[in-house]
Image (cartoon, grey):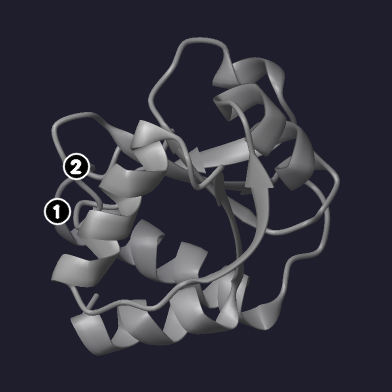
Amino acid sequence: MTFDQIRYFCAAAQLICYRKDYPMYRLLTELFQERRIQPRILHYGYSEGAIARLVEQGMGIGAVAEIEGLEKYRVRVLHPAWLTGGRYIYLMRHRTRMVTQAARRLQERILAQKKQNGGQTGVP
C-alpha cells in the first residue's frame, strides 16, 4: 500500500482513537505525522476495550495497541505492516456489519499486503 493510498483511506474512513491526553494517542499522532497522514478521527476512547466497543457499534475503524482479549469483541483485527512503533498497533472493524467503501478498501489493501508478504500483517 502506498503512502498516498494510506493518506486517502485514513482521511476517508472514520477513525476511533485514544483520548488526546493518552500516551498511545501521542504515539499514533507521531506515526501519522511522520507519514504525513491526516486521519479523520471522529470518536475517542479511554481504552482498547472502549474503542473495540465503539467499533462493534459500527462507529468506525479503531486504532489500538496489541492487548489480550480483543478476540472477545465482535471486531476483526488487522495488523498492517506500515503501522508500527515499538508496540504492535492494530486496526479493527466490526465483524459482520457493513462498513464504508473506504474502510472496505483499506481492509482489502491490508489483506492483499498480507498475501504479498507471506502473512506478515498479523491478520488472522
Q: In this view, does 72 lie to the left or right of 67?
A: right
Query: Circle 1 sits on which residue?
Result: 117
Label 1: state its secondary structure: loop
x, y (%) of residue 113?
26, 62
Question: Three-letter amino acid code at disc 1?
Answer: Asn
The residue that appears at 59% across and 40% down in the rendered structure is: 76
Looking at the image, which residue sits at the far top?
A: 68
Please rate how many residues cluster around mark 2, counting C-alpha atoms within 10 Å: few if below 14, some from 14 to 19, many from 20: few
Q: How far apart are marks 2 and 1 (CA)?
A: 6 Å
Compare residues 90 and 110 and report the one nearer the observer: 90
Position of 1 relative to 21 (above/below): below
For residue 33, the mark is: none
Position of 16 relative to 67 (above/below): below
Count the marks: 2
Label 2: state its secondary structure: loop
The residue that appears at 32% across and 46% down in the rendered structure is: 26
Marks 2,1: beta carbons within 8 A? yes
The residue that appears at 74% across and 66% down in the rendered structure is: 99
x, y (%) of residue 16?
61, 53
Please tell me in which quadrant of the rendered image residue 66 appears: top left
Please rate how many residues cluster around mark 1, counting C-alpha atoms within 10 Å: few if below 14, some from 14 to 19, many from 20: few
For residue 120, the mark is: 2
x, y (%) of residue 96?
80, 47
